[in-house]
Image: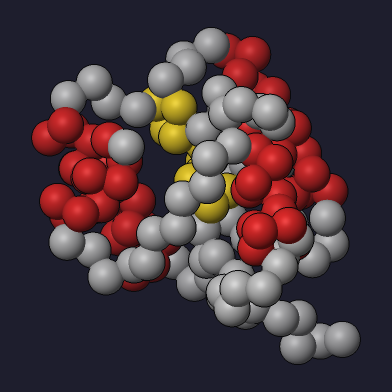
Amino acid sequence: MLTKEAFEESRLRNRLEMVDDGEDLMDYLRSRGKYADGAKSRPSLILLDLNMPRKDGREALKEIKDSPDLRRIPVVVLTTSKAEEDILGTYDLGVNSFIVKPVTFKAMVDVVKAISEYWFEIIELPPEEDSTV
């Protein structure tokens, strides 16, 4: 919820979709279950919490990065963990960035602004579909 509020406070133009857990994330990305009928676009970026229920962020990250149709979506871990095994493990799985959630709301707003600026203004993201096929 803090992340959602930070997005609102930042007044970013990026659409934010939230899911409840790792299973919902994978259903959303694969248009399954309750997301099967909804018209949605592929996310440009996934902000991933490692400590999600049902399927944790590590499992979801592995599934995303093992999937040819999902692995190009950049994934940024945004979590409370500072554990070295989490940092190393997620980079080994292919995470694009690892960010420790700040403790204050103002700092969280600053992080959200920096994420948005970097991922949507500075760098060039891959096209949604592979045009070389």
Q: Nearer the viewer, residue 103 or 30?
A: 30
Looking at the rendered structure, the number of numbered marks drawn on it comes to 0
67 up-or-down from 69: above or below: above
Q: Quadrant of the N terminus?
A: top left
Quick one: quadrant of the C terminus?
bottom right
Image coordinates of residue 29 in percent, x first then y, are 68, 59
Q: Is residue 12 left or right of residue 25?
A: left
- In the displayed structure, would residue 24 be above or below residue 39? above
Apparent side of residue 10 relative to residue 122 in the rendered image (left or right): left
Residue for point 20% across, 54% down: 8
- Can residue 69 be seen here? The reply is yes
Identity of the residue drawn at 12% across and 35% down: 106
Residue closest to the eye, 96 or 21: 21
Q: Residue at x 64, y 13 (%)?
A: 85
In this rendering, would 8 be left or right of 39?
A: left
Residue 70 in sight in this render: no
- Percent from the top left, x then y, of residue 58? 69, 30
Give percent across and percent down for residue 117: 30, 60
Q: How is the image coloured?
A: secondary structure
User: Residue 28 location in percent, x, y?
Assistant: 64, 58
Residue 6 sits in quarter: top left
Res 95 → quadrant: top right
